[in-house]
Image (cartoon, helix red, strand yellow):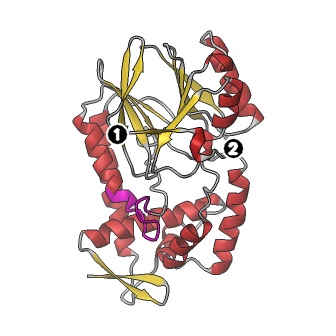
Amino acid sequence: MKIVSISVPTPFYVGPVNCYLIAEDPVTLIDTGPKTREAAEALREGLRRAGFRVADLQRIILTHAHEDHCGLARSLRDEAKDAEILVHGWETGHRVGRLEYEEHRHLLVRAGVPDEEIAQMRRMYEGVRALADALEDDEHSELKDNAEIEFATGSLRVVHTPGHTPGSCSFLREADRTVIAGDCVLKRITPNPVLSPDPVDPSRRFRSLAEYLVSLARLRSLSPTLVHGGHGEDVTDYEELFNRYLRAIRERQAAVIGLIPKNGATAWDVAQELFPGADDVHRFLAVSESVAHLDLAQSEGKLAVEFNGDREVYRKV
């Protein structure tokens, strides 16, 4: 199976996104890049170098539905004469109703984020959402955990790896234990466990970091020899990265717990202390990171949580 990496520029701090062309029948693209002219040109050039055109695409698979990974999906599908788009059912970022504003606002209020800050985050996201075209529910098919995606020379197995988002998926080529992991595995940075409503009960918060730890362990059980991440270089020593991730997560959790004063703190309070210089989209990511670590610490009995009005206040046990 020929897997071709195509680096596509993004306007985000994380830098270029790695899209993967499976140059086999049916010709398949995994992730697309954001909806920008620069991204579209880079993707076309990458396809050309591999001997293909957009019109040759028969499937478009999304590891997850963040704008830097799904932004061009609809326009590519249309140009390729209705290539099939596949994404996990727990993802929402690609959908017409993807903002689910009240659900996300409720989560931010619970985290202690001030109203004026929530309004600013909303305005910021209105700009980000322009980097992806939305899809109606009947315009994509659903990826199922453990399903086999068939090609002429083999298959990729879907591995549901929630954490970064609820519906994040990786793809395993069992013949040589190669994994395409999206943003579940990144060589240089630990992925942000993004604040999201629970896909089963949207009135609740998705326990992103606990799920992410399970996903990392699941990938480890596959003994991958090579992992293609969503950004940056390939990972050739997953065991080393796995242990480095665990250390980083435990160190961050200890720092979070250490920031809780005697009278308690909200996730917003912790985010302000943990990332004092955060601006723009990073303020939302700072809240996401703080909530994820507070949730994990609370689930492990290291913190207690209680409501003060609409806000959750964490206290040391």
In screen coordinates, is 250 left or right of 143? left
Quadrant (top left/top right/bottom left/bottom right) for the N terminus: top left
Give the quadrant of residue 35.
Answer: top right
Task: Name the N-terminal-most of marks 2 and 1.
Answer: 2
Q: Is residue 70 magenta?
A: no
Give the quadrant of residue 152.
Answer: top left
Disc 2 crowd, CA 10 A, few/some/many (<14, 14-19, 20+): some
Q: Position of residue 166 (x, y in %)?
A: 43, 52
The residue range painted magenta reads: 198-210
Q: Position of residue 310 (x, y in %)?
A: 49, 85
**Cβ atoms under marks 2 and 1 closer than 8 Å:** no
Going by the numbered disc 1, the residue's amino acid type is Asp
Q: Is residue 184 above or below residue 61?
A: below
Q: Which residue is mark 1?
A: 145
Residue at the farthest right position: 37
Q: Which residue is mark 2?
A: 133
Q: Position of residue 190 (x, y in %)?
A: 43, 48
Report the number of numbered marks.
2
Disc 1 crowd, CA 10 A, few/some/many (<14, 14-19, 20+): some
